[in-house]
Amino acid sequence: MLNYIWLGLMLCAVLIGGWNGHLKEVTDKSLEWANSAVVNIAFMLIGVMALWLGIMRLAERAGLVALLARAMRPVMRLIFPDVPADHPAMGSMLTNIAANMLGLNNAATPFGLRAMKDLESLNPRPGTATNAMCTFLAINTSGIQLVPVTAIAILAANHSTNPTAIVGTSIICTACAAVCGVLMAKFLSRLPVFRLAANSGPGGSRGNEAQTGPRKPPSPALDPTDKVPVVKEAATLQPLAWWGTLITAAYLLFFAVLFLRLVFPGTFGLAADADTTRQNLFIRVVNAVSLLSIPFLLSAIPLFAMLRRVKVYEEFVDGAKEGFEVAIRIIPYLVAMLVAVGMFRAAGGIDWLSHVLAPVFNLVGFPTDLLPMVLVRPLSGSGSLGFFTELVKQFGPDSLISRMAGTIYGSTETTFYVLAVYFGSVAVKRTRHAVLAGLTADLVSVMMAVFVCRIVFR
């Protein structure tokens, strides 16, 4: 699927750019985005990746990932039946989903890349996406987030009387998108064109090769008949002593007090700013959780690991080493996707698509003013943010169009960027039905945003 999309973007960029007289812009953007993919994205990811993969290693060794996976086992087994219940991928996927919900983008991406690496360890045919990978990507591209912080910030900066009004609509839309994305991934995986052929070897139906293309024998390290290792823990892992439990409880109590101070500042004799005073209780709770999450994770996980006799510095460094390797590995995939998207936008392809699709969307009552942003959203986060900002300035921050746009921005994701980064991290080139499942989640979110906002804000 990505083969045809990528080629289509490149060809359309040249053809439309040539017709519109924008070939120079197309050429300039191709070089600009090629450089940006390496310098501004891949290299910028190295430090973040090293930090969070190091913390992830400590969480593994301390047994926290296994604990999280066991707690959510019934739900995760329902969504990912092909992944063993005690496999590291379960915990990695859960931490990624939790980070996305809290808006911790810097932590969510490294956790997601680690989840893809863990899922790849179950893949007997490297290069082809498994059903679990496609389902996991469908969840990620649905843009699950409790509070759309960026959209709220844009509305607030333009003096909206109630910038947090889109929180409820965004939650509804992203929930519907996630459910539909997962269901579509399950449905598409059963179609003959996407179905994985059964392994002729002892792996049986767990084969992971598409029906088309040459059959490749699995490498010994990825033999599906091998026993799947459970979440690794340190060899010296010991139960918490009574004093370790006491220290852990005291640390948790400290953060609980910080949380209460942020949610109820007046109770602790603190002066609340004007923004905090206007926010309802739910928004204050979510903002407090978002503010405290990263400091808590960066300190509590190493502390707990040390109390479990884990050599925290050594394990952190070992985990951080993966950050550089992953960031370098995704460069070709980022260059390929971002160059194609940049060329298509520079050629005027988005304007052309908006003009062609406008009559169809008018027939179904979809506001055509939203079309440019909707078309750009799966391709570019910065581009869609620019369109959203323009809509807010044109129609006003409290208009129906602006709230629809804010809901769409807060409940969708840059699908093609996510696919390029996540699949690129494990060198998957045959993405099967992941693109269709991700775009389905985007489409459902957009349509639900228009429908729900018309009901809520009429």
Image (cartoon, rainbow, N blue to C red):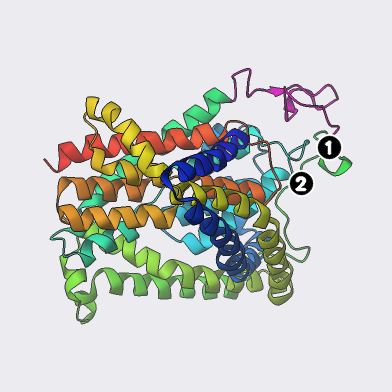
Looking at the image, residue 173 sits to the left or right of residue 401; the answer is right
Query: Dot 1: what SS?
Result: loop
Q: Is residue 57 above or below residue 74?
A: below
Q: Is residue 208 magenta?
A: yes
Where does the image place residue 45, in percent across and percent down from the top left?
59, 65
Q: Say whether marks 1 and 2 touch (CB < 8 Å).
A: no
Q: State the quadrant of the N terminus.
A: top right
Q: Main secondary structure of the magenta part?
A: loop
Q: Nearer the viewer, residue 215 or 336?
A: 336
Provide residue 111's location: percent of width, then percent of height: 58, 56
* Residue at 53% across, 30% down: 185
Q: CA distance from mark 1 to mark 2?
A: 12 Å
Query: Where is residue 104, by image quadrant?
Result: bottom left
Residue on which disc 2 sits: 229
Give the magenta part as a residue range: 189-218
Residue 450 versus residue 151 in the image, above or below = above
Q: Tell me the quarter of the picture where residue 314 sits.
A: bottom right
Quarter of the image where one finds residue 327: bottom right
Q: Is residue 147 visible?
A: no
Residue 330 appears at what percent x and percent y? 66, 55
Mark 2 residue crowding within 10 angstroms, few (<14) / some (14–19) / many (20+) = few
Which residue is at a point 65% across and 58% down the rendered structure image?
63
The residue under the point 46% across, 54% down is 100
Task: Please report whichever mark, 1 or 2, sits nearer to the chain's N-terminal start.
Answer: 1
Note whether residue 385 is visible. yes
Relative depth, front residue between 386 and 340: 340
- Picture residue at 51% right of the left edge, 39% below the top: 15
Residue type indicated by callout 2: Pro
Give the numbered dot on residue 223: 1
Above or below, comparing residue 120 to residue 238 in the picture: above
Image x and y of residue 416, in percent:
52, 45
